[in-house]
Amino acid sequence: MVRGNSLISFMFFVIGVILHSVYLIYDYKNQEGAGWWMREFGLAKVEESENLNLTALLLAGSNVVYSLSAQQLDESTNLEWYNFGLSSEAMTDSNYWDYISDTLTSKQRQNVEVIVYSGIQLLSNGYIRQRNLEDSNAWGERPLGLTPNKPLYEAIKNPKITRVKRYYPLPLDKGDFDFKKMSCPQKYQEAFVREENWSEAKTWIESQIFTIQSLFTKAKIIFVIPSEFYGDSYDLDFDRRFFKKVKLFIKDQFGDQIKVLIQPPYANKNLTCDAKQHANENGRYWRTKNLSDFIRSN
């Protein structure tokens, strides 16, 4: 009797393992979310840039997508720009730099004279560590593992798989954002935050600069801290102390090789789109002009 019960328990266990494995595979192949439009957006830039003679690049995440314009920089400098901003900066640093190195040939990279890198990692406490722990690909899709992305009870409750509405449209020429196909609700909650783990901040800064130098050996690098809107939460004195430390660290490590631009906060929420680091069309013009003025004076 005991042996019969053990056999039945074992059979239920095996069936459970099989069902769990089947669901893991189903969940992996039917991941919902932004992956499809993030991929389309990134691959559109790959296709367009194949035959371009580029001499200057805008690099990093969605703050670059929304808030900097390669076309505007073309008009205000003597360089040929392209906007390689990706949503969430491809989820991890390694994903992003793999995307850039795979997209641009060695010859294209050697022709680049100016790199503007504008990451938000220092503007959010814990974001550097979060990115280091992320295991998804550049499009936010996670690998097959022992834990599903969506619990089984959620899949049973809402079995229909629907494509989410595109978060933002395919890029214009030069990789710029198409504001004609995007609304800007400005309903986000503003907040002033900085990375609190200085050790992680220093490691991240060094790693990003070393990677850029290895990929673009002839380029002048401008390390940009992007504009955000903080409203009444902004602490100017703390901000000045924080970025004075950042500038001194970069100067100590790299001398005068790296130019650092701390872009001012947006003075008005009406210059932003759907997040504090995302400009709208007017904010993009303002922030890009601030950058072009810096480039011309340096």
Image (cartoon, rainbow, N blue to C red):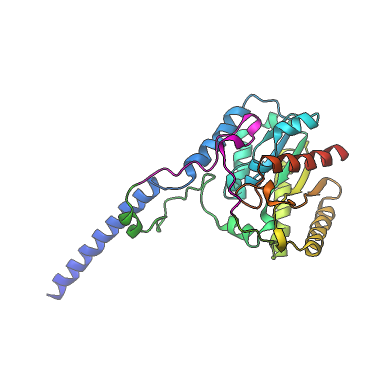
Q: Quick one: 56 or 112, which is closer to the camera?
A: 56
Which span of residues is magenta-colored?
A: 161-187
Residue 105 is one of the magenta-drawn residues = no
Quadrant the N terminus occupies: bottom left
Q: Which quadrant holds residue 247?
A: bottom right
Expressed as whole percent of the image width and height from the top left, the position of residue 225 reads: 74, 51
Residue 95 appears in the picture as rendered? no
Depicted 119 relative to depicted 192: above or below? above
Q: Is residue 166 left or right of residue 22?
A: right
Q: Residue furthest bottom?
A: 2
- Residue at horizontal 76 percent and vertical 63 percent from the top: 235
Residue 180 is one of the magenta-drawn residues = yes
Q: Is residue 129 left or right of residue 141?
A: right
Residue 130 appears in the picture as rendered? yes
Q: Residue furthest left?
A: 1
Main structural element of the magenta stretch: helix, strand or loop?
loop
- Residue at horizontal 64 percent and vertical 41 percent from the top: 65
